Amino acid sequence: MLKTIRRLSKLARPWRKNEIITVVSLLAAAVLNLVTPAIVRRLTNLLTTPGSLTMEMILLFSALLFGAYLLRAVCRFFAIWQAHIGAWNFVGYMMSLTYEKLQKLSLKYYSDKQTGEIMSRAINDNRNLEQLFAHALPDLVSNVLIVLGVSVMIFTINPVLAALTLVPAPFVFYVSTFFSKKIAPMFRRNQEVLGEVNAEMQDNLSGIKEIQAFAKEDTERDKMREECRRYATVNIKANFANAIFNPSLEFLTCMGTVIVMGVGGVLALREQMNAADIVGFFMYLSLFYQPLQTFARIVEDIQTGLAGAGRVLDILDAQSDVKELPNAIEAPHFSGNIAFRNVSFAYKEGEPVLEQVSFQTQKGKMIAFVGATGAGKTTLVSLLERFYDPDSGEILIDGQDIRTFTLKSLRSNLSIVLQDVFLFNGTIYDNIAYGKENATKEEVIAAAKAASADAFIRAMPDGYQTKIGERGTRLSGGQKQRIAIARAVLRDTPILILDEATSAVDNETEEQIQTAIRSVAQNRTVLVIAHRLSTVMDADNILVLDKGQIAEQGTHKELLAKNGIYARLCRVNTDKI
């Protein structure tokens, strides 16, 4: 716990000034908390001494009490204000830091994680840090200061009674420590289950079309109810332990009051204590045990905050499989010569996807990859983009290993259109312009025309300013793919990757896109993954992948003449291979 707090404190260093102001304000408020019982004790002493109290003294004590309460309120204001300024700025910083880290992690990190669970960590767990820094830790500091200050004051009044009063304190700390160890794992589990609920909700909302299409509403409702019931159960278990903890702590703290009542009463009967000291003792005792009673809530808040912090720090500590070399250089504008040399890769150890793959292509050439599903076609282009790194072998562009370049400069030379197109929730214009920084309107329209998208865009009510909804839900599959192609064309890079980019368009539109691709491919290297024969038959070189290896390669005519795998695929389906 202390290790996590120390690490969070280092991350919160830019807001150290706010922390200092908070602590100083809490210290001042704690001192003023000790002043008010002393004033009341002094006034009580005068009240029990005949002829000692005057109107001037009453006004003086009232003014002192008023001033103490006012200053305490001011100190509390500064403590709360500065604590929240620091805490919320820290939460915003941690959210952005988490997002930046998630951007840097390779795709392998996401392979076994759900988006909703990651979002729960990035948002909900980070938000809990506000409770930790603005409430729990300041309250802990404040309460410790009050307990120490009150201990000093009651010992100055009557050391024997003070010592007896403190007898329950060790038991309070023992119970608090015991339960905190029991409760901490429970609250961490709560955060984990909440992340799983978020993941399930996000997954279902993303697939709402499929749920309705397959009439699975009842099934998914029951699954979500079970997830929510499980979340309720883990919370009930944690709060059951808390329900034992709180009353136990309250009972132990009340024992101090019983001791003062009994022992103090005996001392008063023996005239060893006066009424003013007993009144002062009771007031200080309420200040002493109140922090101990709230210790349960503080422990709960700290455990919740630290549980979330641990999950956030797990992300920040995650290591990417794809790393830039310390001496990585900025890639120049590539010519587009690509070479794979003995490249092998496996997503899981012992299950190779590519084995000793070697090929090369020259600038301005189109190379196509065909083969059965799972043959490794998409993996090849993923390695070129450095979404993953090969287990062995090397990938060269213009004769240089791509690992020697910075990731940003490497990818700035590549454009990719995926089969599963992702479009942002905005306008068509914004989604196309996303491909190039500061793109002009003319460039956006030219790219749309090259992708055979301009006609259907202009036919829409708002043209290029038409809002397409989340992930382009208002567009057909073919329309989304043409916008994605336009985005890639606008990017104007020397290497263009098309991964099943024409799978969702009709034959007429595909011919238009192919014509456009041929026109923009004259000075570019184009890598095509496709099942449609019409998409790959004009390629300069076709690689046929089978079980992670290149089984055949050549032009369309050459491969047909070989009468091998490619020819067999062509005979099975004249339109798709």
Image (cartoon, rainbow, N blue to C red):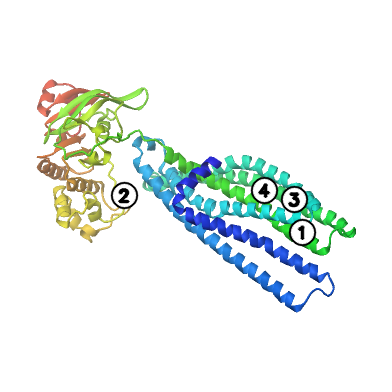
The residue that disc 1 covers is 281
| Front of the two marks 4 and 2 | 4
Q: Amino acid at mark 2?
A: Arg
The C terminus sits in image quarter = top left
Pointers 1 and 4 in contact (C-beta within 8 Å): no
- Helix, strand or loop under label 4: helix
Tell me if residue 101 can be seen: yes
Residue 193, visible in the rendered structure: no
Between disc 1 and disc 2, whose residue precedes?
1
Upstream in the sequence, badge 4 or badge 2? 4
Question: Which of the labelled discs sits on residue 200, or is there none?
Answer: none
- The residue lying at 16 percent from left, 38 percent from top is 334
Q: Give the Cα separation between the discs numbered 1 and 3.
A: 19 Å
Could you give the CA–CA distance between mark 4 and mark 2, rounded to whole angstroms?
46 Å
Q: Nearer the viewer, residue 174 or 179?
A: 174
Amino acid carrying label 3: it is Phe
Mark in front: 1 vs 3 = 1
Between marks 1 and 2 in the image, the one whose residue lies nearer the viewer: 1
Residue at image point 24% right, 48% down: 480
Give coordinates of residue 279: x percent, y percent: 78, 62
Name which of mark 2 and mark 3 comes first in the sequence: 3
Residue denoted by label 4: 243
Q: Which residue is mark 3?
A: 251
